[in-house]
Amino acid sequence: MNYIVFLYVLILGLFTKFTPVEAQQNYVLVFSDEFNQPNGSKPDPAKWNRSKRNPSTSSRWNSNSDKVVYIKNGSLVCRAVPNKWEPTDTAKMLTGGVNTRDKFEFKYGKVEVRMKTNLRIGNFPAAWMSKTFKEKQNLYGEIDIAEVFSNQKRVHHTIHSQYTQTHRKHGLKNTFGKAIDVSKWHVYGVEWTPDYVMWTVDGETTGIFKKPTDKKLLDEGAWTFDYPFYLILNQAVGAGRPGGVAYPNTKKIYETRFDWIRVFQRK
């Protein structure tokens, strides 16, 4: 009898251990893309926009070229390639990214993305979320789920608020990460609530940013995360600025693959 009870407890424990986290925590799937279209396809236009060019490091060479964003073997491929195909474009490289702005935006939830990238000086890919700028809430907000800097075997998580980005104040710890081989597949996650943002790598917690309780900090925009955000997946390269990611080898190809991305929200 005791042996049977032992087996029952063991089986129950195994079942509980491998039950999906989202099911345990009462989450439901609200958005996903498995990128299972035929090879050479473009990302689903009902879900994704091509990221536009702007002066920021992550977007300064963005392109609509077919060479930098496409589906291959069940993954979204985003690349940075030497500019051999756009002779009138002054960009030294062409880079690719996609986003869900105006197509899927959400407030609070859990995001998981399975990705890998190559290890090369100047590499700067990311899976991240940006706040929309609508109505009166013109405050900066950014949650970086996973970033890679150059050839570091480390994933970085960063949270940018009005306080850190606009005022350039860094009195709060807003960067986290983990040493890991980013050239291998890993699942990077973030859980975003009204009270904290928590990052995970392969299910292991790697950082937590809690909403400040200091009214002065809140008045200065230290928590700008109570508004809708949209998703961004991109392959960028560094600009070589002090404190930033090294300048890339503009004759090489940089590539990041996103196997899938899923968003859950509490019931």
Image (spheres, helix red, strand yellow):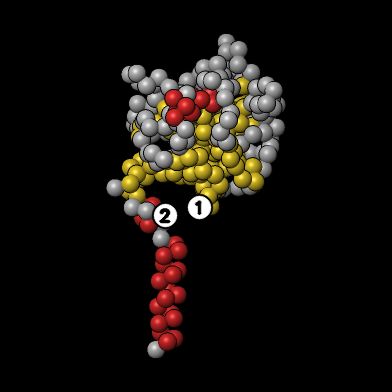
Q: Amino acid at mark 2?
A: Val
Residue under circle 2?
21
Q: CA distance from mark 2 to mark 1?
A: 9 Å
Q: Secondary structure at mark 2?
A: helix
Which percent across, then down, holds residue 43? 42, 33
- Name the residue at 42% across, 32% down: 225
Label placed on residue 82? none
| Residue at the limit of the structure toward the front, as seen here | 215
* Observer-nearest of 257 and 141: 141
Q: Is residue 43 visible?
A: yes
Which image quadrant: the N terminus?
bottom left
Up-down relation of residue 220 to residue 110 (above or below) = above
Residue drawn where x is 29% and y is 47% of the image: 267
Decide: marks 2, 1 in contact (CB < 8 A)?
yes
Going from the N terminus, do you reach mark 2 or mark 1 first? 2
Q: Residues within 10 Å of mark 1 (few under 14, many from 20)?
A: some
- State the mark number for residue 203: 1
Please report the residue visible at 50 percent of the width from the left and 52 percent of the height from the top. Answer: 203
Please, what secondary structure does the residue beneath circle 1 have?
loop
Q: Residue 102: name its quadrant.
A: top left
Q: Residue at x 61, y 31 (%)?
A: 124
Q: Nearer the viewer, residue 221 or 25?
A: 221
Query: What amino acid type should be assigned to the residue bearing mark 1?
Result: Gly
x%, y% of residue 90? 60, 12
Which of the 4 image quarters holds residue 56?
A: top right
In this rendering, the answer to whether 169 lies above or below 55 is below
Count the numbered circles shown: 2
